[in-house]
């Protein structure tokens, strides 16, 4: 049985879709079968980031409404054989997702895939709660700024109350993915510090993804950053995060804090 | 049986005040019920088995709507022990009884003949809650994880201890004192059912609002010296006092 991951945040524009695609592609490169599922009905994005927008025939709403079978709606990635996308519908509204329908789709996906990664819409409404409902693991995507942190805190509360795991009295495994981390702004004190975010949210850190033009470049060519440029800083951070998700113990470093020898010398002089 | 009736002793009828939760719905009721469901989901079974008084004073609904509302609440396992603020014509047999003047009342004894009307009792009730003859054991709950933004912990029965932080945008409401072994970034209301001796303790004060017995202080009213410190807060008269703990 596959593991269901929800990538969620409360706030929009923090990097959920980017992270879903990057983690999905990173896990698929470990030879695991991965499905990424777009729950953002009406505002779908994942197809674009995966470069599959022109191959969408059926979507999750069609499957739920019985107009298509699940295998018909799944789109195989052109670059990675074991990476699939289940797109959202762009024309329907969120109410087209029914709890029973989502449950059926999730149960079917778990039989075929090792990882099912659900890209949650922003907000705390139906779309977001349905995306998290069946999750075994949550990746809480947060930017180092107060509004994002507070929204994430709200989402963590919901993960602990509105999910099937919570209702069964089990504990949802939750990880913090700190994205769009800008080391220059951090140095200037324009962003919350990593330790402050961790202290506020008090869930374990899965990784820190640096703010980088490579992310934009990857989305412009329609590829997850872990496929577009596997050597780039954000891609390497996503690969590490994927390894941690898979249970490996990989130490975390804060981007921009491994100063070279000059940094050390200056540091001493200043002291 | 008849023996008892002819007994010369008077019947002792005691008044006792209980803490009831009062629900005051807003229109439209659909929305309000939705919010209630949300609250119930977040506070896991908060209403279960508790005495609840339904306050419909300013609601402007008719009898049929009131019946429907009671049924809706019953579906949610909220059992109404009384209805406050309803016109007499709205209450029919089978409905919870009408209640008036929800305020703490002292125990009282009535001789058989000189039974006082309930109204008099209400007016004579002292402002301060009575000191019970037998002190009940102070109740408390311990929350062993952080209180997250959007969550609300309500415990009118007594003290609340949180092992973890209370997030910005969350609230803890306690009848007694509140102890937070973590940062207090949200709202805390201690002594919320009329207990001026309740206190608030936290490891790190960054609160949005603190209140004791209805007297409150907003973040901007707090002494900047105390922010970020371990602090206790208590009430002296109408003023919230605070000092660092360690
Ligand atoms: N690490 C990053 N560096 C630079 N830009 C990023 C990064 N992560 C995300 N972005 C950009 O931020 C925007 C929002 O990202 P997206 O993944 O769509 O967020 P969400 O799905 O949470 O709304 C996009 O334009 C994306 O390219
Ligand atoms: Mg998105």
Image (cartoon, helix red, strand yellow):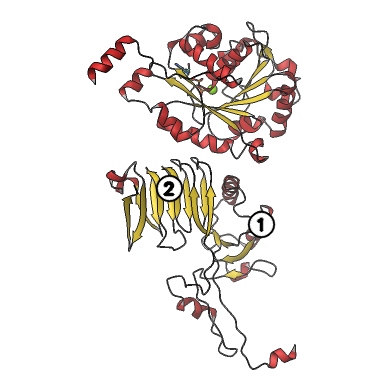
Q: Nearer the viewer, mark 2 or mark 1?
A: 2
Q: Disc 1 is attached to a residue of which chain?
A: B
When the figure is inspected, residue B109 is found, relative to residue A27, above or below; the finding is below
Q: Residue at x 53, y 77 (%)?
A: B107
Q: Position of residue B192 (x, y in %)?
A: 45, 58
Q: Is residue A86 visible?
A: no
Marks 2 and 1, how far apart at CA:
34 Å
Judged left or right of residue B221, residue A166 is right
Q: Residue at x 57, y 14 (%)?
A: A48
The x, y position of residue B90, in whole percent, is 62, 67
Query: Which of these two is toward me, B22 or A210?
Result: A210
Q: As rendered, which of B190 and A101 lies closer to the eye?
A: B190
Residue at 48%, 59% in the rendered image:
B175
Tag 2 residue: B187
**The disc numbered 2 marks a residue on which chain?**
B
Q: Position of residue A267 (x, y in %)?
A: 28, 17
**Label ID, residue A138:** none
Q: From the image, which quarter does the N terminus of chain A lie in? A: top right
In this orientation, which residue lies closer to the viewer: A17 or A230?
Answer: A230
Which of the two labelled residues, at mark 2 and mark 1, occupies the earlier sequence position? 1
Task: Tell me if residue B130 is in the magenta stretch.
Answer: yes
Q: Are marks 2 and 1 in contact (CB under 8 Å)?
A: no
Placement of the C terminus of chain A among the 4 image quadrants: top left
At horizontal 47% and vertical 58% (from top left) the residue drawn is: B176
Residues shaded magenta: B128-132
Q: Is residue A205 left or right of residue A118?
A: left
Does mark 1 fall on the same chain as mark 2? Answer: yes
State whether residue B108 is above or below residue A222: below
Which image quadrant is residue A124 in?
top right
Q: In the figure, B114 relative to A254: above or below?
A: below
Indicate if the residue with disc 2 has its beta carbon within 8 Å of ligand 1: no
The residue where tag 1 is placed is: B68
């Amino acid at each position: 049985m596959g593991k269901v991951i929800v990538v969620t945040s409360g706030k929009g524009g923090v990097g959920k879709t980017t992270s879903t695609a990057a983690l999905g592609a990173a896990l698929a490169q470990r030879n695991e079968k991965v499905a990424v599922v777009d729950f953002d009905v009406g505002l779908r994005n994942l197809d674009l980031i995966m470069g599959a927008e022109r191959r969408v025939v059926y979507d999750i709403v069609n499957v739920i409404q019985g107009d298509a079978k699940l295998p018909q709606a799944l789109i195989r990635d052109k670059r990675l054989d074991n990476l699939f996308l289940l797109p959202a519908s762009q024309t329907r509204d969120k109410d087209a997702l029914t709890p029973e329908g989502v449950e059926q789709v999730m149960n079917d996906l778990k039989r075929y895939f090792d990882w099912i990664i659900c890209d949650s819409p922003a907000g705390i409404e139906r779309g977001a709660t349905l995306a998290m409902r069946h999750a075994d693991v949550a990746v809480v995507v947060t930017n180092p700024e107060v509004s994002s942190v507070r929204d994430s805190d709200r989402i963590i509360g919901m993960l602990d109350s509105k999910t099937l795991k919570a209702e069964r009295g089990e504990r949802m495994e939750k990880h913090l993915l700190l994205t769009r981390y800008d080391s220059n702004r951090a140095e200037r004190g324009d962003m919350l510090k990593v330790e402050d975010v961790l202290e506020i949210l008090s869930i374990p850190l899965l990784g820190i993804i640096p703010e980088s033009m490579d992310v934009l470049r990857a989305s412009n060519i329609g590829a997850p950053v872990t496929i577009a440029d596997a050597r780039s800083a954000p891609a390497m951070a996503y690969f590490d995060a994927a390894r941690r998700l898979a249970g490996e113990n990989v130490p975390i470093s804060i981007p921009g804090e491994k100063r070279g020898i000059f940094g050390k010398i200056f540091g001493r002089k200043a002291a | 049986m008849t023996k008892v009736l002819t007994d010369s002793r008077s019947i002792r009828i005691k008044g006792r005040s209980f803490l009831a939760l009062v629900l005051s719905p807003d229109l439209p009721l659909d929305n309000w019920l939705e919010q209630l469901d949300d609250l119930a989901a977040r506070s896991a079974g908060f209403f279960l088995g508790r005495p609840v008084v339904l306050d419909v004073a300013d609601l402007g609904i008719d009898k049929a709507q009131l019946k429907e509302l009671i049924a809706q609440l019953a579906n949610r396992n909220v059992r109404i022990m009384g209805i406050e603020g309803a016109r007499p014509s709205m209450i029919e047999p089978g409905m919870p009884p009408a209640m008036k003047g929800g305020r703490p009342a002292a125990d009282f004894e009535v001789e058989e003949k000189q039974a006082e009307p309930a109204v008099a009792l209400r007016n004579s009730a002292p402002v301060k809650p009575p000191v019970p003859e037998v002190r009940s054991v102070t109740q408390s709950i311990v929350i062993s994880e952080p209180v997250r933004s959007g969550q609300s912990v309500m415990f009118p029965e007594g003290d609340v201890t949180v092992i973890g932080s209370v997030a910005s945008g969350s609230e803890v409401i306690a009848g007694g004192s509140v102890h937070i072994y973590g940062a207090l970034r949200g709202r805390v209301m201690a002594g919320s059912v009329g207990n001026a001796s309740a206190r608030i303790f936290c490891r790190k004060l960054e609160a949005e609002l603190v209140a004791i017995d209805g007297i409150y202080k907003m973040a901007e009213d707090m002494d900047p010296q105390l922010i970020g410190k371990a602090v206790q807060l208590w009430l002296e008269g109408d003023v919230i006092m605070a000092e660092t703990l360690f």
